[in-house]
Amino acid sequence: QVQLVESGGGLVQPGGSLRLSCVASGRIFSIYSMGWYRQVPGKERELVATIFIDDTMTYSDSVQGRFSISRDNVKNTVFLQMNSLKPEDTAAYYCNVDARSVGAARRQYWGQGTQVTVSS
């Protein structure tokens, strides 16, 4: 199994910045991708950004140019630097990891979510 622990959410004013972190732990054999999704009540969870094992990255159109994803392979940690935040970025942000743990099949893992609120 792989456990994910997120941190870094909070309340920020429009135009401000936040940095989210997600640490993956457990009997990890390989991590194929790490990323972030977000969800607001009543809507489907949407992809924000993903970084793959070959360091390629994808971003949703709504955050392109404002958010930046990175990872520390040694610490199995993924970061999401969020700049120029807008009220519409308000959501619960979930860490997502595509990984294989020792003795288990490859699968998706989810964090518990961290709330980001952008408001004046």
Image (cartoon, rainbow, N blue to C red):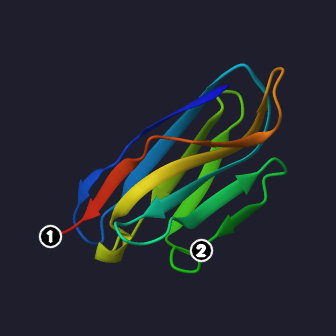
Q: Residue at x 24, y 59 (%)?
A: 12
**C-alpha span from label 2 to label 1:** 25 Å
Task: Using the rendered view, name the quadrant where residue 104 is placed.
Answer: top right
Task: Give the position of the C terminus as an image quadrant.
Answer: bottom left
**Residue pictured at 56% horizontal, 65% vertical:** 48
Q: Residue at x 81, y 38 (%)?
A: 106
Check disc 2 and give the amino acid type. Ser
Residue type highlighted by circle 1: Ser
Please say if 7 is above or below 68: above
Q: Quadrant of residue 59?
A: bottom right
- Give the number of the mark in front: 2 or 1: 2
Q: x, y percentage for residue 54?
A: 85, 51
What residue is disc 2 on? 60
Q: Which of the two discs, 2 and 1, labels the residue nearer the N terminus?
A: 2
Q: Nearer the viewer, residue 11 or 15?
A: 11
As drawn, the label of residue 120 is 1
